[in-house]
Amino acid sequence: MAVTIAPDDFAHCLELLKSGAPDFYFADLLLPEQHKAAIIALHAFHVEVTNICLAGGEPMAGQVRLQWWSEVIQGIRADEASGHPVARALMQVIAEHNLPVSSFEAKLEAHIFDLYNDPMGNRSDFEAYCGETRSCLFQWASLVAGLPPERALADASGHSGVATGIVSVLENMARYHGNGQVFVPSDLLAATGLSRETFLVQPEAAHEAAITGLVDLGFEHEAKARQALQHLPQEARALFKPLALVPVYLKRVQRDPMAVFKPRPPLSQIRRQWALWRF
């Protein structure tokens, strides 16, 4: 079922992806037409939330903005939401596809971690964080597409979320490191002789080992996601297009792990599109 999002709202969501999340933008252009508008609205919501978390500044201000979205999801701020193109589109998608409001609230709650300098927990904690902030995107897309719930779909969504979450951490590492934030699992740091405090000093050999370990974890989840996809119908693969870019990013880090601590140019449009088309 195609969602009837207003043309202006759809255009706004699409432009938000184009300017702020080109990986989603190019992946979503390849979606089946009947699902495209709804999934683009969901990804636009994700970009709105991550922009709050990456903006810096006073954490409490960011938390207030996340709370605003939570209240929009709960229907408390219907009047304000009616004036926001992403909020309008999102609420329409949630209503028409009966998406679980609790998963949106869990995502917003998990993103509060992004605003502060608290240490990341162990690998299980990190994977749970990625599940609530990233795996949900694949789960929502699957619900929009009407795919029947099954173990392979849950596995594909879960592992895809962790793999893309690791890519996000690596691509934003320079920003996080400069802000005194550590998203690397604590047990991975400990295995390389680092702690949260020592990870935040000038990068050295132990940091390279920690980044390499994170890359290996990304490849592990990417492989498990692809394995799960083999048990799903072919049409489901289009919903997991962002997974195609995971090995591209991970291999770039693999070639020069220490480069993550400095700003780097984005992937070229051609490189993105080629990987997405081949998936």
Image (cartoon, rainbow, N blue to C red):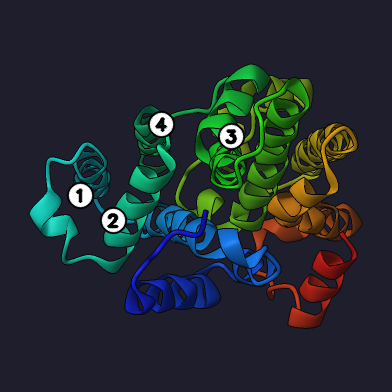
N-terminal-most mark, 1 or 4: 1
Q: Is residue 202 visible?
A: no
Amino acid of disc 3: Cys
Which residue is denoted by mark 1 in the rendering? 61
Q: What is the distance, in whole Å, between disc 1 and disc 2 at their CAs?
A: 8 Å
Mark 4 crowdedness (10 Å alpha carbons): few <14, some 14-19, many ≥20 = few
Q: Are marks 1 and 2 in contact (CB under 8 Å)?
A: yes
The residue depicted at 36 percent of the width and 60 percent of the height is: 55
**Secondary structure type for disc 3:** helix
N-terminal-most mark, 3 or 1: 1
Question: Viewer-proximal residue, 237 or 253?
Answer: 237
Q: Residue 210: x, y in percent?
A: 76, 36
Which residue is denoted by mark 3 in the rendering? 130
Which residue is denoted by mark 2 in the rendering? 57
Q: Are marks 3 and 4 in contact (CB under 8 Å)?
A: no
Tell me, for residue 100, which label it has, or none: 4
Q: Are marks 4 and 2 in contact (CB under 8 Å)?
A: no
The residue depicted at 90 percent of the width and 65 percent of the height is: 278
85 left or right of 270 in image: left
**Secondary structure type for disc 4:** loop
Res 166 quadrant in image: top right
Q: What is the distance, in whole Å, between disc 4 and disc 2 at their CAs?
A: 31 Å
